[in-house]
Amino acid sequence: MYYVGLDVHSGRSSLEILDADGKCFKRMDVHGSWTDLEKKVSELPGPMALCYEASCGYGHLYDRLSRFAQRVVVAHPGQLHLIYRSKRKNDRVDASKLAKLLYLDMVPQVHVPNVDVRSWRAMIEFRQKLMARRTMAKNQVRALLRGRGIKSPRNLWYGPGLAWLKALGELDGVAALQRDMLLEELSELNSKVKRVEKELAKFADRHPAVTLLMTIPGVGLRTAESFAAYVDDISRFARSHQLGVYFGLVPCQDASAAKNRLGHITCDGPSTVRKLLCESAWQAIRHSPTIKGWFERISGADPDRRKIAITAVARKLAVVMGAMMRSGETWRENK
């Protein structure tokens, strides 16, 4: 068995190959695209195991290299830095480190979902970007009105409010042009969001976990689909409590002897799911006495602890959702 460490870039990659005894067999640089890298890997002696760091497009590269290697391992960049820190860093050194960690079977691996799940995740993130652009356009319209001292109706983006905005005659030529162009952008973004959500519905229909998670009060389609897409295979988590760590909803910790310092949440993992879980937590405390009880127990009627409490509720929701995916049971309200 040969052990190959790859330091992959878009236009240049470095390789180091170790033999079965862990000694350097060959080093090389590949100048060119991933197609050139794939061709070079296909010419390497086998059987072999490959290792590279996760970066943009790591799933696509995983599929391509899996055709030639007996085993492909994708390393977690953050955890890899903690294991193998060095003041000397270049492409060849990085490739050498990866090869050695692969030989020692000490690579901190990341989960590589299949093509279907990767497409699902990409569509979820694309929708979030469209929503951010739409929010930005709405804020620009509100700033335009506020800059002219114009008070807008409460429901500005629906029915009479939108008709009022289109017919507003208090804006001069430049401001009216800005308003018209922003409304056109909003209309276009609304259309795009609907197209994306139509495509997302196809993914959700193929995954029964989405319907299961929506039985939780306050958890809607967007939260359920994002959670299911990023968890993918619940069996890869030994315990449901690990989901709080995965989504970065646990506090930073610095413990030594009798001292235990807890800080802000780690914010590791997919930020989209973390955001949606917090949004669902606010809705859940309004619709579920059980979840409201979690919130009140942590906040203790202290307004300054509301954000801490809602983050804790979001973490609890992640744990409960993981347990539901594992057992297949629907939400049960405590009585």
Image (cartoon, rainbow, N blue to C red):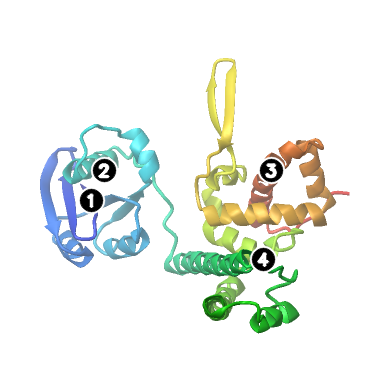
SS label for mark 1: strand
- Please say if the residues under marks 1 and 3 sit with CB atoms less than 8 Å apart: no
Residue at the image point whose x is 24% and y is 62% from the top: 68
Q: What's the amino acid at mark 4?
A: Gly
The residue nearer to you, when weighing 274 against 175, is 175
Location of residue 96 in the rendering, given as x and y in whole percent from the top left corner: 20, 41
Asked which secondary structure carries label 3, the reply is helix
Q: Position of residue 59 (x, y in %)?
A: 37, 61
Graded by Cα atoms within 10 Å as few (under 14), some (14 to 19) or many (20 or more), the crowding at tag 3 reads: some
Q: Earlier in the sequence, mark 3 or mark 2?
A: 2
**Residue type at the position of mark 2:** Leu
The residue at the point 23 percent across, 50 percent down is 7
1 vs 4, front mark: 4
Numbered mark located on residue 6 in the image: 1
Mark 1 and mark 4 lie on one chain; the one further toward the N terminus is 1
Mark 2 Cα shell of 10 Å, populated few (<14), some (14-19), many (≥20):
many
Location of residue 234 in the rendering, given as x and y in whole percent from the top left corner:
56, 54
Comparing labels 4 and 2, the label whose residue is closer to the camera = 4
Residue 214: which quarter of the image?
bottom right
Q: Are marks 1 and 2 in contact (CB under 8 Å)?
A: yes
The disc label shown at residue 307, or none: 3
**Label 4 sits on residue:** 149
CA gap, disc 4 and disc 2: 61 Å
The residue at which mark 2 appears reads as: 98
Does residue 85 sit above or below 246 in this rendering?
above
Mark seen at residue 177: none
Say which of marks 1 and 3 sits in front: 3
Q: CA distance from mark 3 to mark 2?
A: 41 Å
Q: Reading the chain from its start, which is encountered first: label 3 or label 4?
A: 4
> For the residues marked 1 and 3, what is the alpha-carbon distance in whole angstroms?
43 Å
Determine whether, in the image, residue 236 is placed left or right of residue 84: right
| Dot 1 amino acid type | Leu
